[in-house]
Image (spheres, rainbow, N blue to C red):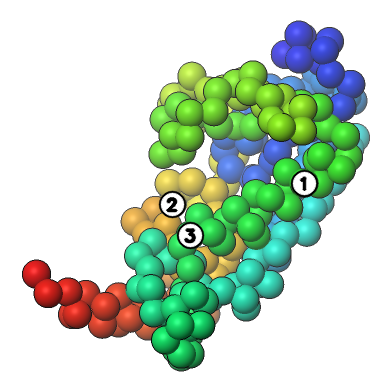
Amino acid sequence: METIFARHANVALSFGGGRDSLACLHLLRRWWDRLTVYWLNPGNPFPETVAMMEDIRRMVPRFKEIPGRQPEIIALDGWPSDVVPQRYTSDGNTIFGPTPFKVQTRLQCCIRALMLPGYNAMVRDGVTCCIRGKRSEEADKTGIESGYVSEHGMELQFPIYDWTTADVVAYLQAQGVAEPASYRYAKHSLDCMDCTAYWGDGLPQYLHAQHPAAFTEYVRRIGLIKRAVAESLSECEV
C-alpha cells in the first residue's frame, strides 16, 4: 500500500458493498485521507446496500456515488439472462419482428450499466490508480493482473488477490465488521434488485427471504425467459 500511495496522488477504491470491497476498505484505513471511495449505484439497488453506502459515506473523508444505467439499458435491450434466445434480443427483434419482451446477455448488461459508467467517471476525475477487491478464486478470469495499466493510464491494484474466502471472512471478523446479510444466501454481493441473470448464485433465495414482492416478479420474469429459451431449443434439429 505504501508504494501505491507514494506513486499516485489520486487513488480510488471501487466499492460495491461486498465482503471483498469491505476488506479492502478497512485494509486501506490508514490512507483514507488520500483515498476516494467510489460506489456505482446501478439504478435499482437493494435498500440495504443504500443504507450501507450511507454509513460508508459518513465514515470516509471522500465518497463519490456514480449513477449507473441499469434501468436505461434494460429498457433498451431487455432483461439480462445467462441463456439468450436470439429472436428475443434487440437484433433479433430488428430482423424477425418484436417479441413480448427482450433479453440480453448478462455481460452486455453489466458492462454497459455498471462497469463502463464507473470506469469512465474515474477517468474524468483523473484517477491514476483504482483499487479493487478482485481475488483469484473468483469466476472472473480475464487475465488482468494487479499492476495492469489501462489505455487511459489508470493502474489497477488488487491487494487481496491471493486471499481465500476464509481469509476475507477472518479479516472482517478481526476488524469487527459484519459481512452483508446477502452472503447467508448468495455467493457474492448483489447489485440490482431486478436482475434476472447470474443463475445459481443465490439471488432468488435472498429475494424470497428478504424481498418477497421482488421475488414474485423475479419468478414471473424467469418463467418467461425459460419459456423463450425452451421455444428456441425446440427448434434444434439434433
| Residue sticking out furthest to the left | 238
Q: Is residue 109 visible?
A: yes
Q: Which secondary structure lies at badge 3? A: helix
Residue found 54% across the figure and 59% down from its top: 108
Badge 2 or badge 3: first in the primary sequence: 3
Residue 22, x across and y down, in percent: 64, 35
Viewer-proximal residue among 103 and 63: 103
**Numbered tag placed on residue 186 in the rendering:** 2
What residue type is disc 3 on? Arg
What residue type is disc 2 on? Ala
Residue underneath mark 3: 106
Q: Residues within 10 Å of mark 3 (few under 14, many from 20)?
A: some
Task: Classify 67 as above or below 75.
Answer: above
Q: Which secondary structure lies at badge 1? A: helix
Q: Is residue 50 visible?
A: no
Badge 3 or badge 1: first in the primary sequence: 3
Q: Is residue 30 left or right of residue 93?
A: right
**Residue 68 is drawn in which quadrant?**
bottom right
Q: Nearer the viewer, mark 2 or mark 3?
A: 3
Residue 69, x across and y down, in percent: 70, 64
Residue found 65% across the figure and 60% down from its top: 113
**Numbered tag placed on residue 180 in the rendering:** none
Task: Classify 150 as above or below 69.
Answer: above
Task: Classify 212 as above or below 49.
Answer: below
Distance between mark 1 and mark 2 Cα atoms: 29 Å
Asked if marks 1 and 2 touch (Cβ < 8 Å), the reply is no
Viewer-proximal residue among 43 and 95: 95
Distance between mark 2 and mark 3 Cα atoms: 17 Å
**Residue 25 is drawn in which quadrant?**
top right
